[in-house]
Image (cartoon, rainbow, N blue to C red):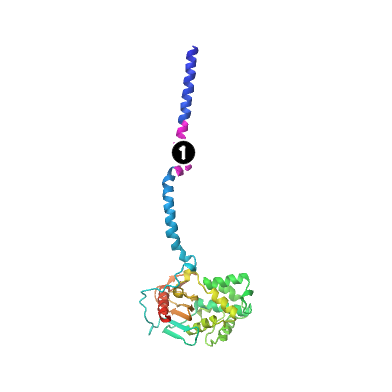
Amino acid sequence: MRRTLWLGLVLVLVTGCAQATDGASRTPSSSPTTPDGTTSATSPTTTTATPATTSTTATTTRPEAGPSAGPSSRPTAAVPSSTGLTSLRGNTRNAIAWAPLSNPSDVHVEGSVPSSRAWSTSKVLVVAAYLDTVVDGDPSRIPARERSWIRAALTASDGDAVVAIRDEIPGRPGPAIDRVLRSIGDTTTSAPDTSQGSMQWTLRQQLRFMAALHAGRVVSAEASAFLLGQMHPIAAHGWGLGRIGASSFKGGWLRADTETRQMGIVGGYAVAIITAGDGPAVLQSDGDSAHVQQMDRLAALLATRLR
């Protein structure tokens, strides 16, 4: 009897150990059915693929996103090739203009346009009038808030920012802008109190302004240097003059049926280019549209003239 009981006890202990061991061995195999287990089960494949995917993304995707991240990625010194545009003689929808900074009166204009509305190139004039009337030509006196508005207006062509700056100008903005223009010898351009973008500003007078800016004669030497330093468009607006190495420039645009234009400094020249709605228009970051392809073509033609 005792022997029978002893054998029964041994059988119970053996069976219990076997069940415990079997259960422990099944735990890892059943864990993939849990969320953690699923990740663990697929991780060998994912882990193998992940480095390759990560490497590909780092090598391919980021450089493609680079040009829109900042001006340093923009091919500013490259001249677009195979433009097919060799001359603007007799052209009435496009024009380029240039004058050596050493002799600004030696103005060259090729082509013509029926209208020369300033659009966002006028933002430079608004800021110049602000510098003249509010801070007495001393950029160091610009408050931080207004400084951020100026930067947004001249780099990202922010419309709200330039209106905010314009509202800081005491009295009427139009005469304040005109005084700046008259001080550098422009007796023909006239600015309204609002909607300065609609004012007519010819290529010749834009060359006069850029040459005066380079010479430090717009408001003050300090103000001129400050304006040139702010005229560095964001990468998304780096087409046209930005593709031929412009050191400072500002563009203006609105719709597919209106002018797209730029003025700036390229090497030792004051330059300006304009198209009267020639070619397709491309939506810009400010919500308006610019004739990017045609401006690239005009800039490439201008580069051949400067050489």
What residue sits 47% from the left and 17% below the top? Answer: 7
* Rendered image quadrant of residue 222: bottom right
| Relative height, residue 12 to residue 167 (above, below) | above
Regarding residue 48, the answer to whether it shows in the image is yes
Q: Nearer the viewer, residue 13 or 160?
A: 13
Which residue of the protein is positioned furthest toward the top in this rendering?
1
Magenta region: which residues?
Answer: 23-40
Report helix, strand or loop for mark 1.
Answer: helix
Q: Please say if 73 is above or below 191.
A: above
Residue corresponding to mark 1: 31
Q: Is residue 175 left or right of residue 70?
A: right
Kindly report the secondary structure that dominates the magenta region of the rendered protein: helix
> Relative to 151, is 111 above or below?
below
Residue 86: say if magenta. no
The x, y position of residue 176, in whole percent, is: 59, 82
Check residue 25 for magenta coloring: yes
What's the amino acid at mark 1?
Answer: Ser
Which residue corresponds to the image point at 57% horizontal and 77% vertical from the top-left? 225
Q: Can residue 129 be spotted in the picture? A: no
Q: Position of residue 4 (x, y in %)?
A: 47, 14
> Number of callouts in the render?
1
**How far across and how far down the image is residue 292, in percent?**
43, 73
Residue at 46 percent across and 37 percent down: it is 28
